[in-house]
Image: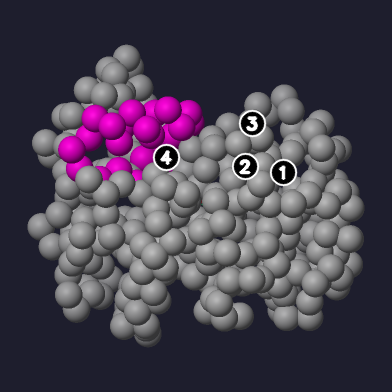
Amino acid sequence: MTHFLDINKTSPADLRGIIDNAATMKAARAGQPKGTPDADLSLANHMVALIFEKPSTRTRISFDVGVRQMGGETMVLSGKDMQLGHGETIADTARVLSRYVDLIMIRTFEEQTLLEMAEYASVPVINGLTDRTHPCQIMADIMTFEEHNGPIKGKKVVWSGDGNNVFASFAHAAKQFDFDLVFTGPETLQPEAALDGLYTTVRDPNEAVQGADLVVTDTWVSMHDPQSARERRHNQLRGYQVNKNLMSKAKDDALFMHCLPAHRDDEATSEVMDGPNSVIWDEAENRMHAQKAVMRFCLGK
Ligand code: CP
Ligand code: NVA
């Protein structure tokens, strides 16, 4: 069974294959209406369950449209509308779903839910974000970087802000794709210890971004963070806002990325988000192409 659970659980060669396949598939359908079926319909007759226990715009729609382009069918399910949200175990849900669908994508809270789903499902399971990681996002980010600035190997990527789930997948990617990752953020929001050794920390953001090829940030309050922590987090993170001044310290052709949704003028200014170095819309589009390649990989297509 080939699941896609985390960047560090898939080999560098397979990750590279997924990115290359995504780029090929994207090029093959350039300029066509979004509903145009792919030429090879690699998911024909396949049923895909998309389970969301948290809100989503990009993940939900990019998976849904991507499956349809490949000739498959989707069911978008809310965790709370399923018995899963009312006491049925994850293991039993996984066993039952495997009798109906060919692939499961789940966005959930605890990583354990994802891991249990994968353990008991007899079809591939894809991680659509947990409190700890967001691997599909980073596949799209790598693809986007390489589209604009060539191979990411050996490049300097700087993450400014909260050491959260999206950062964690960047840290896994730094090892698998062999780039340098710098974290700049407050000590109180340092990434989890399990990621030690995958990145370096530079506390001063102005120093951290020097020579950066890519500057990345994310929301200061993630979906799994309590709203009561909002003000405290804002106070801790204010100094790590990505603004024009900070971007001016990076390389001239440095890219700016944000997985979105953004809180404009908090973690990044609109001037940067809408500026010449920003590739956030390509990044969002590439979610779909990258995930199509992930699904093909999982299904051996
Ligand atoms: N970046 C991302 O995963 O967005 P959604 O929460 O809208 O899916
Ligand atoms: N860190 C954010 C990412 C959203 C796509 C969150 O988990 O809410």
Front: mark 2 or 3? 2
User: What amino acid is found at the position of numbered circle 4 in the picture?
Assistant: Arg
Provide the residue designation for mark 3: 225
Question: Which of marks 3 and 2 precedes in the sequence?
Answer: 2
Quarter of the figure with residue 270 = bottom right
Where does label 1 land, which residue?
Answer: 162
Whole-angstrom CA distance, mark 2 to mark 3, is 19 Å
Tell me the distance, in whole angstroms, between the alpha carbons under discs 4 and 3.
Answer: 15 Å
Which marked residue is nearer to the observer: mark 2 or mark 4? Answer: 2
Closer to the eye: label 3 or 1: 1
**Magenta region includes residue 56:** no
Q: Residue at x 33, y 28 (%)?
A: 116
**Label 1 CA crowd tier, 10 Å (few <14, some 14–19, many 20+):** many
Label 4's element?
strand
Residue 191's disc number: none
Q: Residues within 10 Å of mark 2 (few under 14, many from 20)?
A: few
The three-letter amino acid code for the residue at tag 2 is Leu
Q: Quadrant of the N terminus?
A: top left
Q: Residues under labels 2 and 4: Cα distance?
A: 21 Å
Q: Of the residues under marks 4 and 3, which one precedes in the sequence?
A: 4
Residue at horizontal 34 percent and vertical 59 percent from the top: 294
Residue 273 horizontal/vertical position (percent): 70, 66
Left or right? Give the position of 103 relative to 59: left
Disc 2 vs disc 1: which is toward the camera? 2
Q: Is the CB of mark 1 within 8 Å of ligand 2?
A: yes
- Residues shaded magenta: 106-128
Q: Give the mark, 3 or 1, whose residue is nearer the N terminus.
A: 1
Query: Which of marks 4 and 2 precedes in the sequence?
Result: 4
| Residue appearing at x 57%, y 81% in the figure | 150
